[in-house]
Amino acid sequence: MLQEVILAVIISIDTFLAAAAYRSGSIKIPFLSAAVVVTFSALSLGLSLLLSSFLSGFIPVQICEISGFIILTAIGITTIFKSLIRNLVRRLSQRGELSLHTGSSGIVVKLYLDDTAADFDCSKVLSLKEAIALALAGSLDSITTGLSTGYNEIDPVISTLFAFITGSAAIIFGSLAGRKIASMNHDLSWLGGAALIGFAIFENLT
């Protein structure tokens, strides 16, 4: 059960940071929108774990272990690299935008360096439609992680349950801690990447 809990906590890190970003941007997350985000993430993890467990019956365990470790580590490194780039751009651009000039024309590329870009209509409320778009994007990590770990006898049902619990807690505590996290002026999404790498090593050793 420890693996299921750890896995659920890891995939909830991004949800926590997103909720914190919304709170710091004074964007409200209605109950239904929060439920959509959490449910999508939990079900994506559970179904991908189930599929991975099924496929492992046809693929040698050694290949599953090696490929799972490589994929999780790659995702973790990519997440850390993205966080470093976002922090660098944030420092270089105090106004949240970069100006690129080609010839006599100027191109202004606005880089929204937080997760509040999901509020497409700038209504300061995460609508159901926006929540679905956010959930679909966030579920990609859950699916990839599930497919990379399902071979290791991780229970899909228990993982889904814990993912729902930790996801709900992530939104609640993220909303409460939003202002504090925003005041740090750092992108903390690298935590999720580091956690994935740590989990990959943990899985490989157990």
Image (spheres, grey):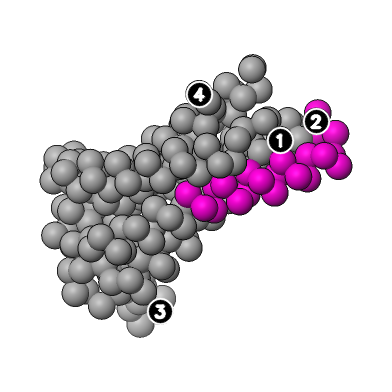
Dot placed on the residue nearer the N-terminal end, 1 or 3: 3
Judging by the rendered image, the residue that carries numbered circle 4 is: 2
Judging by the rendered image, the residue that carries numbered circle 2 is: 61
Judging by the rendered image, the residue that carries numbered circle 3 is: 103
What is the x, y in percent for residue 65? 73, 30
15 in magenta: no
Dot placed on the residue nearer the N-terminal end, 4 or 1: 4
Range drawn in magenta: 42-63
Question: Residue reaching furthest top?
Answer: 205
Labels 2 & 1 near each other (Cβ < 8 A):
yes
At label 4, which amino acid type do we have?
Answer: Leu
User: Of 135 and 109, which appears nearest the observer?
Assistant: 135
Q: Is residue 183 left or right of residue 63?
A: left
Discs 2/4, front = 4
Real-space CA distance between mark 4 and mark 1, rounded to the nearest whole angstrom: 16 Å
* Local SS, label 3: loop
At label 2, which amino acid type do we have?
Answer: Val
- Which labelled disc corresponds to residue 54? none
Real-space CA distance between mark 2 and mark 3, rounded to the nearest whole angstrom: 56 Å
